Amino acid sequence: MDDVPFEITLQVRDTCLCLAAQRAARALARRFDEALRPLELTNGQFSLLMSLNRPKPAAMGPVAELLAMDRTTLTAALKPLERRGLVEVTVDPKDRRGRLLTLTTEGQRRLAEAVPIWKHHHREIEKHLTAPDALRRDLAILSSIERR
């Protein structure tokens, strides 16, 4: 078995985009989890509720795609929100195999409480970035690589 030189370990630590993105994502997740804790929401639940904030019920597929989840993961993520009365999952009348996702009145209320918290922390984080719009564009590019 060949050993990997320690210099390679340092190179990966200092240059790996995947590692850097994972570290940043974890730091952001921790910050927003802590900020949203008083509302009994995680950052993932906030994103899921926000993805359902639309005029008409959402089908599972587009929501899963937006959140970069497979349907099984989305179904699991919906369960606690459904049990808490924040989300309603119903059968799609046009396709009985499909499900439609809707924010309940309580879900809309909780989301409305969360938005000012999100805005505040988002503004604070952006103060530390040199080019937040460029970062968003680059992250969108990275997100689209998988689909190519």
Image: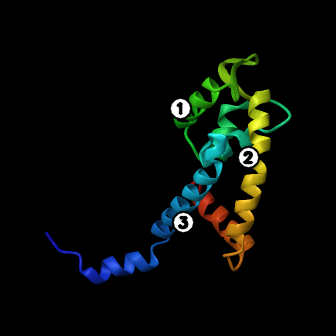
> Which amino acid type corresponds to the residue marked 1 in the rendered image?
Ala
Does dot 3 land on a helix, a strand or a loop?
A: helix
Q: Nearer the viewer, mark 2 or mark 1?
A: 2
Q: Position of residue 11 (x, y in %)?
A: 38, 81
Q: Which residue is mark 2?
A: 114
Residue 93 in the image: above or below residue 36: above
Question: Alpha carbon of mark 2 to alpha carbon of mark 1: how far?
Answer: 22 Å
Q: Which image quadrant for residue 13? A: bottom left
- Identified by mark 3, the residue type is Ala
Q: Amino acid at mark 2?
A: Ala
Front one among 48 and 126: 126
Q: Position of residue 105 (x, y in %)?
A: 80, 28
* Residue under pointer 3: 24
Residue at image location 61% in from the left, 24% down from the top: 83
> Front-most of 27 and 147?
27
Question: Sequence order check: which comes first, mark 2 or mark 3?
Answer: 3
Q: Which residue is mark 1?
A: 76
| Residue 9 locus on image (x, y percent) | 32, 77
The secondary structure type at the circle numbered 1 is helix
Q: Residue at the spot x=73%, y=43% of the render?
A: 50
**Residue lying at 45% horizontally and 73% vertically, measured from the top left:** 16
Q: Nearer the viewer, residue 115 or 4?
A: 115
